[in-house]
Image (spheres, rainbow, N blue to C red):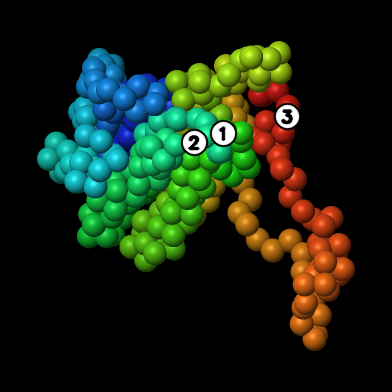
Amino acid sequence: MMEGKVVIVTGAGGGIGREIALMMAQHGASVVVNDIGVSLSGEGANAGPAQQVVETIKASGGIAVANADSVADAASAGQIVECALQNFGRIDSVVNNAGILRDALFHKMSNDEWDAVLKVHLYGAYYVSRAAARYFREQQSGSLVHMTSTSGLIGNLAQANYSAAKMGLTALSKSIALDMQKFNVRSNCIAPFAWSRMISSIPVNTQEQQERVDKIKRMTPDKIAPLAVYLAGDAAADVNGQVFTVRNNEIFLMSQPRPLRSVHRSEGWSPQTVAEHAIPALKASFIALDRSADVFQWDPI
């Protein structure tokens, strides 16, 4: 499915990114395995994880090169794309998977915690996608796959930075899809459920939290890779601007905001009539303050 294609996978030194990089190579792609090897909170650096994935790919007869540039800086992100061009002569797809976590309740979140997470998830996806867009436009083809999250699509506690970044990434993907469809460039999102380092920071202070973690542990990162590989390739030529969720062996197409219900008064509205008429009429359609776990209550299948 990916024969002859060149793919960048960011954050591919472990977890979901690693499994996507491995499957891309298995299906014939030449892969730029990008990972700077930082801690879960974005500290430190280690080129080892990316190189280990490259060695695994090569041991199976695949083609790959390691890259340790950061997605969180525009110039550095551009070097990731240049790495693909220098080693393989082209770029066909980008999987924006790199991420860090700095969880905190909103009223306790620092500016640094906010900035660091948005820099990697949202700015990073923008920087790498923007660097690739020039070449996609010239060759009149290309595909972007972004890892979003139900923390943004639905909601979660103590993740205002992460949720905002992931919801912003979803909107960015839709904008790219609209702006670049005339160049045959596609952009889609996947919200993955899988046990990985990103999830391992979930607290387990209660029995409910322990049960949630045990449930997530049954969902392995390799379950995400098939959809990512499909979306990156030509078989998905008519799939654009969509948001999917993968939960073990389930694939969901997620809704995108659309009007639910309307009310009208020919004479216009006042604060009083809003209170007396509009809100009572609309209230039955209000969206609850759900978290991701409230919506996906059943066991992974």
Q: Can residue 173 be seen by looking at this rendering?
A: yes
The extreme left residue here reads: 86
The outermost residue toward the bottom is: 267
Type of amino acid under label 1: Leu
Q: Separation of disc 2 and disc 1 at Cα?
A: 6 Å
Residues at circles 2 and 1 in contact by the CB criterion of under 8 Å: yes
Query: What amino acid is found at the position of numbered circle 2 in the picture?
Result: Met
Dot 2: element? loop
Residue 298 is left or right of residue 170, and the answer is right
Measured Cα–Cα span from mark 3 to mark 2? 28 Å
Q: In front: 15, or 119?
A: 119
> Which residue appears at 65% of the width and 35% of the height?
292
In the image, residue 207 above or below residue 194? above
Relative horizontal placement of residue 49, taking residue 192 as reference (left or right):
left
Residue that badge 3 annotates: 297
Residue 113, x across and y down, in percent: 42, 35
Quarter holding residue 216: top right
Q: Locate residue 133, reporting x and y percent.
A: 28, 55
In this view, the residue in front, 164 or 85, is 164
**Regarding mark 3 in the picture, which secondary structure is present there?**
loop
Q: Quadrant of the image for the N terminus?
A: top left
At 61% from the left edge and 35% from the top edge, which residue is drawn? 156
Task: Tell me, yes or no, whether the two marked residues, 1 and 3, touch with CB atoms within 8 Å.
Answer: no
Say which element carries label 1: loop
The three-letter code of the residue at mark 3 reads: Gln
Q: Which residue is mark 1?
A: 105
Query: Disc 1 or 3, which lies upstream in sequence?
Result: 1
Work out whether residue 149 can be spotted: no
Q: Is residue 8 above or below residue 198?
A: below
Residue indicated by mark 2: 109
